[in-house]
Image (spheres, rainbow, N blue to C red):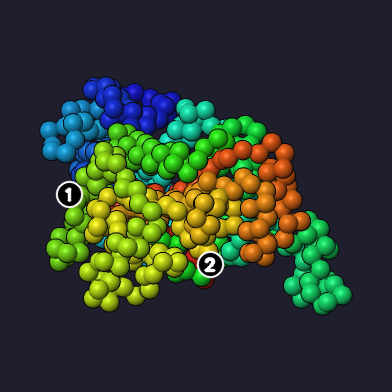
Amino acid sequence: MTDTSKMRRTEIADILKNPSIGEEVLVKGWVRAFRNNRFVALNDGSSFNNLQVVLDSDNMNQEILKSVSFHACIAVTGKLVESTGSGQTVEIQAEQVEILGANNLDEYPLQPKKQTMEFLRENAQFRMRTNTFSAVFRIRHAVAFAVNKYFHDKGFYYMHTPIVTGSDAEGAGEMFRVTTLDPKNAPTDENGSVDFKEDFFGKATNLTVSGQLQAEIGALSMGKVYTFGPTFRAENSNTSRHLAEFWMIEPEVAFADIYDDMDLAEDFCKYLINYILVNYPDDLAFLDKRIQDLEKNMKAELRRPMSLIETLKFVVENDFERITYTEAINLLRNSKPFKKKKFKFPVEWGVDLSSEHERWLVEKKFKKPVIVHDYPKDVKSFYMRMNDDDKTVAAMDVLFPGIGEVIGGSQREERLDYLKKRMNEMNIHEDELSWYLDLRKFGGTPHSGFGLGFERMILFITGMSNIRDVIPFPRTPGNAEF
Ligand code: 4AD
Ligand code: MG
């Protein structure tokens, strides 16, 4: 027998990709399933697929055999042989099994059966060991990689914008305060308010809601930049689409108008989806089948109109619909649900679109992604460029089936007088953003950008239904475990 103590571990992905039949190998991983006291499905995370390990259960150490259980961590040495069973082409005939980490199933929260998503969320220290979550997080990794690849290949620079900031990019006031002051004993100013001059940074600071304003600094000197980092919003939205801490990708491009911005957004979305279709077919096939199993007993109208993979291909292969906000309102007011008073929120020119309206446009009317542009100025942020009608701004939202808004973006107001006027109207102090105004005073130019909600894109690609299940450790109102 080979001296296995000196052997190097081989990763399961490498074995499955390029099996050297007849060779002795050492593999390590977690037991995903154990059948007939003989067949172990071993997974080390390197691939969606498991390696089948065949145990000679009659002739092996019975104490060790007893410890080969669901999610135990084991090391196996043995010979790679062609598999006669269905489902795999290669398997390993175990000669030696070592228990690296036994699993006490009597106390282990997960059991080898279907678990609810809520239960797995509460046990996030273990959920990545399941097929579903390891597929989701492998895809999350791959999309992050594809984001950087896309922009690098196009000549964008990755820019790191601050997490702690003194400015509110969206002007929506939904920020988490960052302070080292003692809440019981905070210094006060002459009006009795907390005196943040005494605070760590000498001013009031928050966690950022967006890196856009700083990215504009980058674009107006380096041409094309993007940020990709965590952002924080203290909005009390307990929905399956909102997180208090989420990751956002924000490209910012000099010399680009709103139409260039829409082109970039559409191309970028298609690239990310296609990257996963091409490179992660096994993970996608599993997630697709998972949804079909879940939907088996559902009413037809609740099921997805297309399978997950068909939906992803459809988005990659077809143009997104582009309509103005005004057209969207007209379509909505002529829709069946509007006439039958089925919408909860009002539909009239001037109000923001609600998720029910967005989903009607995408899922019922156009049955494809829709970009809505030129929104009323009052429902959008101060930095968006005023259109000639003086009522709408050059904003655009990309809406996806099943999700709603995945991207929000705009052409930025490059004209100093217009920008100052909007800031005054919206009570944003000029002295707080003097550096931002400087970009208009000294060598400014038209420029545009957008923000893609990373988790919303992962939701779409994986077909998961709750945003809490596509980020390893979700932060939502009342929840910051781990
Ligand atoms: O539309 P938003 O608020 O746009 C901005 O922050 C701009 N500064 C972006 C830019 O132009 N550079 O957010 C952008 C995207 C949304 O379309 C949505 O996908 C996602 O971020 N998002 C959230 N995702 C998860 N949880 C939340 N609470 C989110 N809020 C926004
Ligand atoms: Mg938005």
Residue type marked 2: Glu
Residue 113 x, y percent position in the rendering: 25, 60
Q: 6 or 153: which is nearer to us?
A: 153
**SS state under label 1:** loop
Q: Is mark 2 within 8 Å of ligand 1?
A: yes
**Residue situated furthest right in the rendering:** 190
Disc 1 residue crowd, few under 14, some 14–19, many 20+, Cα 10 Å: few
Residue at (29% x, 27% y) in the render: 17
Q: 358 or 197: which is nearer to us?
A: 358
Residue of label 1: 36
Residue of label 2: 235
The answer to whether residue 204 of the structure is visible from this angle is: yes
Kindly indicate whether the residue at mark 1 contacts the one at mark 2 (C-beta within 8 angstroms).
no
Q: Is residue 360 left or right of residue 257?
A: left
Residue at (32% x, 37% y) in the render: 274
Residue at (24% x, 47% y) in the render: 311
Image vertical order of residue 478 relative to residue 424, above or below: below
Residue at (26% x, 66% y) in the render: 334
| Nearer-N-terminus badge (2/1) | 1
Image vertical order of residue 248 relative to residue 342, above or below: above
Image vertical order of residue 303 relative to residue 443, above or below: below
Disc 2 residue crowd, few under 14, some 14–19, many 20+, Cα 10 Å: some
Question: Image quadrant of residue 345?
Answer: bottom left
